[in-house]
Image: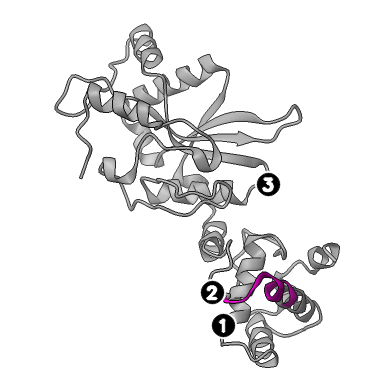
């Protein structure tokens, strides 16, 4: 059920800590249950934050996947609230109508889809990213609100830009979806020592084979008397944690192909 917005509601959310904190302690300003979402909403477990992310569309999820993979991104804060007094002031200055909550005269607490902490040569810095389908960028009202958001972050001295669906690499996205639930060793009912041993054995098996992935995985499961599919699950876990690496994440990971066509075996040896 959508949240009933009022000044009292906003004050309660601030006291609750919504929009504050970092990494696992961050509380998004908006949760999926608060608003009707466009497209399918998602609540994935974050690789970097170790908490559940509140994503209002498939496009937001697709963008998040890139941030999860990037070694430069340190923290991901979604649905980040902007200071309402500042957005009201900027709206007046820019002659832009400030949004209100539907059925009320309460000014909206604007949010930016992602506030990221990223590594830089001078240490960590913040960047802000807004996600929009490209078709929406021809809508006058959408443009006005984006102008207001842009002005807000410029005043904060923080880099801001829009990311559209046209920037999503389909192969990378599908590879990451295939990996995303395997950061933790779900489906591997072994203690950490056994997982480490099996990981080293799998790296060796893949490095020394001319077979397809599927053939190698089947032989590996038989060799160690493992349930069918264990080697594939372990492989996904290794890729998600960058214990193994494919040559190009923008090419589909096809397990029917020979290992040497897909896997970066030089990366495996560099970890030894």
Q: Residue furthest top?
A: 93
- Assign the C terminus to one quadrant of the image: bottom right
The residue under the point 52% across, 43% down is 24
The percent coordinates of residue 131 (x first, y second) are: 44, 39
Question: Mark 2 or mark 1, which has the lower sequence index?
Answer: 2
The percent coordinates of residue 47 (x first, y second) are: 57, 52
Question: Mark 3 or mark 1, which has the lower sequence index?
Answer: 3
| Disc 2 versus disc 3: nearer the observer | 2
Residue 71 disc label = 3
The residue under the point 57% across, 23% down is 158
Say if the magenta span includes residue 193: yes
Residue 179 disc label = none
Q: Gap between marks 3 and 1, in whole Å?
A: 29 Å
Q: Which residue is mark 2?
A: 187
Q: Which residue is mark 1?
A: 229
In the image, taking residue 112 as reference, residue 98 lies left or right, namely left
In contact (CB < 8 Å): disc 2 and disc 1: yes
Q: Secondary structure at mark 2?
A: loop
Q: Secondary structure at mark 3?
A: loop
Nearer to the camera, 24 or 258: 24
Q: Quadrant of residue 80?
A: top left
Q: Which residues are magenta?
A: 189-197
- Crowd tier of the residue under label 3, counting other residues whose Cα lies within 10 Å: few below 14, some 14–19, many 20 or above: few
Say if the magenta span includes residue 67: no
- Crowd tier of the residue under label 2, counting other residues whose Cα lies within 10 Å: few below 14, some 14–19, many 20 or above: few
């Amino acid at each position: 059920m959508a949240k009933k917005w009022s000044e009292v509601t906003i004050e309660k959310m601030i006291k609750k800590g919504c929009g504050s904190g970092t990494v696992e302690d961050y509380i998004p300003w908006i949760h999926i249950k608060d608003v009707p979402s466009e497209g399918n909403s998602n609540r994935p477990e974050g690789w970097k934050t170790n908490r559940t992310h509140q994503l209002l569309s498939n496009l937001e999820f697709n963008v998040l996947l890139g941030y999860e993979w990037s070694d430069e991104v340190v923290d991901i804060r979604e649905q980040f609230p902007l200071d309402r007094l500042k957005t009201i002031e900027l709206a007046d200055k820019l002659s832009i109508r400030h949004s209100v909550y539907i059925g009320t005269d309460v000014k909206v607490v604007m949010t930016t889809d992602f506030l990221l902490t990223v590594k830089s040569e001078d240490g960590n810095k913040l960047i802000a990213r807004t996600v929009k389908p490209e078709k929406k960028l021809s809508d006058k009202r959408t443009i006005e609100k984006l102008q207001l958001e842009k002005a807000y972050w410029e005043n904060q001295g923080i880099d801001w830009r829009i990311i559209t669906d046209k920037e999503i690499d389909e192969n990378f996205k599908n590879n990451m979806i295939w990996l995303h639930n395997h950061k933790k060793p779900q489906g591997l009912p072994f203690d950490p020592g056994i997982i480490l041993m099996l990981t080293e054995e799998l790296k060796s098996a893949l490095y020394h084979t001319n077979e397809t992935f599927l053939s190698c995985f089947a032989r590996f499961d038989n060799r160690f008397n493992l349930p069918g599919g264990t080697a594939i699950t372990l492989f996904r876990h290794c890729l998600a944690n960058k214990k193994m690496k494919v040559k190009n994440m923008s090419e589909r990971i096809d397990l029917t192909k020979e290992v040497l066509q897909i896997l970066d075996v030089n990366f495996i040896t560099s970890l030894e």
